[in-house]
Amino acid sequence: MKLKIMGILVLIGLFNGLEAEDDFGAAWNKSVLGGINLTQTGFDNWVAGGESAYAWQMNLNYKFVQTLEKTTWATSGRFAYGASKTGQADQRKSADEIKVESVLTYLLGSAINPFVAVTAETQFAPGYDYNAAPVIQISAHMDPGYFRESFGFGFDVREGVNTRLGLALKQTTTTDYPAPYADDAATVEVETLRNEIGAESVTDISIKISKTAFYSSKLELFSAFKALDETDVNWDNTITAKISEHVNMNLNIKLIYDKDLSVKRQIKQAMALGLNYTFI
């Protein structure tokens, strides 16, 4: 299964390479942005009290878009990893994300165009439940891994706002941690792969708030046909404010709802001030 998954990721890159070879003269619109955020506090004989602490996070975002006469091929990715440590406690990760998306759109010359898309998502490092005693590991790289293949129609709602609707296949793969990610509790057998078919909606928003502030959002909805009353939600929002040429402030709020994982919504919020560098 892992070889199959890696094959999907390789194919994404190969398809982009083949598209470039088919029309070498076509221009690519490329964007690669990396950043690092660091915070540190130290105490030595500080009578007012306090604990030494540090936190760091690295981010890399890229997007490659090639528009030909009849097609647009867009591949984007987000990679993030960070950790923090307070006092005598062990270092714990505070951010961990790998996400790649590739969308091929056939241009009909209108605001509505057919598309096919592939999305892959996982994490870099093991995850732990620190509320358990003793601490237990609950996830790892590619464990779980999420994959979606979809096709349908995309809509240009307005400048900076587009959405796509279609039929989607979704796979959740695990190795050592089938529950709650892939295992069906209603069966005796322990499943390490969950296949679902359903309807998918993805909405991307990119809005310039001011000369120095930018808002981006991706709302992903998936409803399996066997449970249309249960919709998986993945909503990622980021506000970036440019303070100087290489210094940005970022506020990220991510909301996830997946009844298979938790009956309550999950929220992650992070605010950071750090260095950013645009490679291309």
Image (spheres, rainbow, N blue to C red):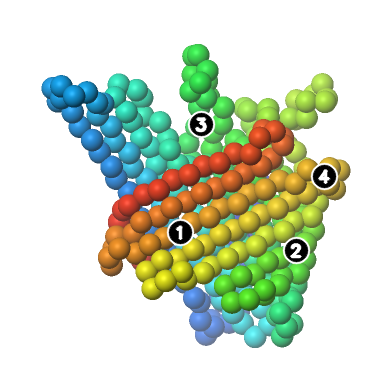
Image-quadrant location for residue 181: top right
Which numbered disc, 1 or 2, marks the residue that appears first in the sequence?
A: 2
Query: Could you tell me how far apart the alpha carbons at marks 2 and 3 are, in whole angstroms?
Result: 33 Å
The amino acid type, in three-letter code, at marker 4 is: Asp
* Mark 3 element type: strand
| Residue 176: image location, x then y, percent | 62, 27
Image-quadrant location for residue 192: top right
Q: Which mark is residue 229?
A: 4
Residue 126 vs residue 38: left or right?
A: right
Which numbered disc, 4 or 1, marks the residue that appears first in the sequence?
A: 4
Rendered view: 88 above or below 184: above
Nearer the observer, disc 1 or disc 3? 1
Residue topped by disc 1? 239
Residue 245 vs residue 250: left or right?
A: left
* Mark 1 element type: strand
Asked if the residues shown at circle 1 and circle 2 are in contact, with their CB atoms under 8 angstroms apart, the answer is no
